[in-house]
Amino acid sequence: MIIEHIIGNISDKNIDKYNIDYVNIEWYECQKKIHRLTSSKGRDVAISLDKETQTRGLDDGDILYIDDDNTAIIVDILPAKAIIVKTKDVQEAIHCAYEIGNRHTPFFYADDTKKTFAIPYDIPFETLLNKMHVTYAVQDIKFLTKYRISQNVTQGHSHTHTHS
């Protein structure tokens, strides 16, 4: 089967009557145009995203397909190691955001409060946070598309630096 559109998300629909079949996707693959996956129940799933869906990215709980037997294929974003940053004030938040942007690191809110943010675990960035005396924790989380602050660097962004 080839899936080209998202039907909805389990947060918006009652899925109690469905048999759930998950496809696991790494957070950094959510904006790939083409996927070839095997579901948790062994079903071969091919995904070819349209431009709009690709730009948005697949998100945890997206409903990809519902068959006649009431089996729903659902996206499950796999947890990944992250640095969760909680800044003490606006100035510290701006400094951290600058450093993250300067490294072209994907940047996410950690939760609905939008008071903490998350980046994929990176030893050099952890070292920098220690030097900056910024409060952070390292834990496994799901990097959710709905919490993404910055676009993936694979979206055609590039620039050059000139050195004198």
Image (spheres, rainbow, N blue to C red):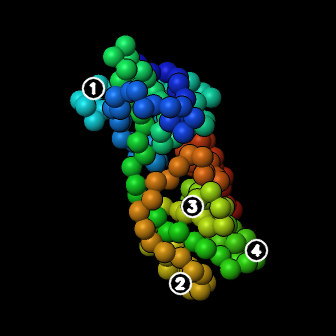
Q: Residue at x 61, y 41 (%)?
A: 156
* CB contact under 8 Å: marks 4 and 2: no
Residue depth check, mark 2 versus mark 1: number of the one nearer the observer: 1
Considering the numbered disc 2 on the image, is that residue within a helix, a strand or a loop?
helix
Answer whether labels 1 and 4 touch (C-beta < 8 Å): no
Query: In whole angstroms, how far apart are the C-alphas of marks 1 and 4?
Result: 48 Å
In the picture of the structure, the residue carrying the numbered disc 1 is 43
Vertical placement of 96 versus 143: above or below? below
Q: CA distance from mark 2 to mark 1?
A: 45 Å
Q: Secondary structure at mark 1?
A: loop
Decide: few, some or many residues near mark 3? Use Cα within 10 Å; few <14, some 14-19, many ≥20.
Answer: many
What kind of residue is marked 2? Asn
- Badge 1 local density, few (<14 within 10 Å), some, or many (20+)? some
150 relative position to 22: left or right: right
The CA distance from mark 4 to mark 2 is: 18 Å
Q: Earlier in the sequence, mark 4 or mark 2?
A: 4
Label ID, residue 110 = 3
Disc 3 or 4, which lies upstream in sequence? 4
Mark seen at residue 90:
4
- Number of callouts: 4
Residue lying at the far top of the rendered structure: 68
Residue sitting at x 42%, y 32%: 16
Q: Residue furthest left?
A: 42
Of discs 3 and 4, which sits in the foreground? Answer: 3
Question: Label 3 amino acid?
Answer: Ala
Callout 3: SS: loop
The answer to whether residue 20 shows anywhere in this view is yes
- Disc 2: which residue: 130
